[in-house]
Image (tube, rainbow, N blue to C red):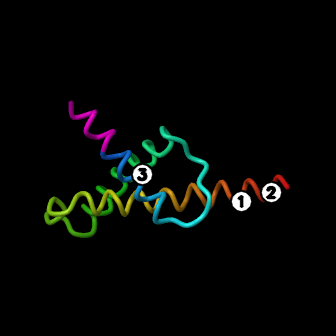
């Protein structure tokens, strides 16, 4: 059951990340979920490094920050690749 909650959290956080980062995103349903789950792990790692034990107070915020960072990187990489093909 924890895996289902992790995937749902990833979907929500990935969708928030896609809404916050401007530009066109070439991610589908599963791409958004993967970005959200990866963002949750990245946010966990960043949160643990920056605030230590107080990280558990706001895990959703850290997951959202990580998701925004990953969406930003994915958008930057796919935009450059699309421009170089022209």
* Residue found at the very far top of the displayed protein: 1
Q: Secondary structure at mark 2?
A: helix
**Quick one: label 2, few (<14), some, or many (20+) residues within 10 Å?**
few
**Foreground tag (2 vs 3):** 3
Q: Position of residue 73 (x, y in %)?
A: 55, 59
Helix, strand or loop status at disc 3:
helix
The quadrant of the rendering that contains the C terminus is bottom right
Disc with the residue nearer the chain's start (1 vs 3) = 3
- Image quarter where the N terminus lies is top left
Q: Residue 35 in the image: state x and y as whole percent.
A: 45, 48
Q: Residue lying furthest right in this view?
A: 86
In the depicted view, which residue is nearer to us: 78 or 54? 78
Span colored in magenta: 1-8
Q: Tell me where residue 23 appears, x and y as whole percent.
A: 60, 64
Badge 1 crowding class, 10 Å Cα cut-off, few under 14, some 14 to 19, many 20 or more, is few
Residue on which disc 1 sits: 80
Residue at screen point 31% across, 41% down = 8
Is residue 5 within the magenta segment? yes
| Residue at 49%, 40% in the rendered image | 29
Cα–Cα gap, marks 2 and 3: 27 Å
Instruction: State the predominant SS element of the stretch in magenta.
Output: helix
Q: Which one is earlier in the sequence, the residue at label 2 or at label 3? A: 3
**Residue tagged 2:** 84
Residue bearing mark 3: 14
Figure quadrant of residue 33: top left
CB atoms of marks 2 and 3 within 8 Å: no
Q: Are marks 2 and 1 in contact (CB under 8 Å)?
A: yes
């Amino acid at each position: 059951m924890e895996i289902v909650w992790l995937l749902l959290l990833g979907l929500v956080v990935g969708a928030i990340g896609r809404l916050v980062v401007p530009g066109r995103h070439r991610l589908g349903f599963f791409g958004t979920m993967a970005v959200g789950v990866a963002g949750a792990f990245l946010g966990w790692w960043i949160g643990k490094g920056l605030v230590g034990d107080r990280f558990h107070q706001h895990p959703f915020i850290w997951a959202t920050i990580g998701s925004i960072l990953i969406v930003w990187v994915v958008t930057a990489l796919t935009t450059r690749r699309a421009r170089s093909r022209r």
